[in-house]
Image (cartoon, rainbow, N blue to C red):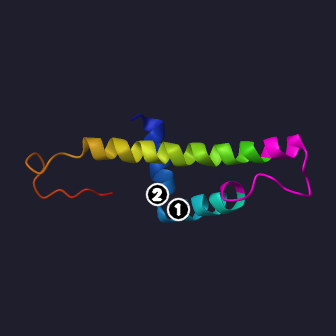
Amino acid sequence: MDNLDLAYFHTFTSAPGQMVIEDLRANFYDVPLFNPAEPSALGLSFREGQRSIILDILNTIDRAKSGFKKEIPTSSEGEGEEDPF
């Protein structure tokens, strides 16, 4: 896991960051790619580009979460420490 993954993780898992990522998802990810008002390939490509950015952010957050889980010590190594995720 690199520092950039950690930066994305910390940015988008804070309370304000979660609000932002939910808004981004609602406006650019969880929407249909096809828009009857703009059926051209250019419009489709533009919307797919927006969607791919959100997907990259979500994948980076997941990659950082996976890295955290791998780095959490076992119960014998870190007595009393809880998994923060």
Check disc 1 and report its element: helix, strand or loop.
helix
Q: Which residue does the numbered mark 1 point to in the structure image?
A: 18
Q: Residue at x 51, y 44 (%)?
A: 59
Residue type, label 2: Thr
Where the N terminus falls, by quadrant?
A: top left
Q: Which residue is drawn at 53% across and 59% down?
A: 17
Q: Which residue does the numbered mark 2 point to in the structure image?
A: 13
Q: Position of residue 34 (x, y in %)?
A: 81, 53
Where the C terminus falls, by quadrant?
A: bottom left
Residue 37 within the magenta-colored segment of the rendering = yes
Left or right: 26, with 70 as reference point: right
Q: Are marks 1 and 2 in contact (CB under 8 Å)?
A: yes
Residue type, label 1: Gln
Using the numbered discs, state the Cα–Cα distance from disc 1 to disc 2 in whole angstroms: 6 Å
Q: Where is residue 60 in the image (x, y as percent from the top left)?
A: 50, 42
Q: Residue at x 46, y 40 (%)?
A: 5
Q: State which region is magenta.
A: 28-46
Check disc 2 and report its element: helix, strand or loop.
helix
Residue 48 image label: none
Q: Position of residue 61 (x, y in %)?
A: 47, 47
Q: Residue at x 51, y 55 (%)?
A: 12
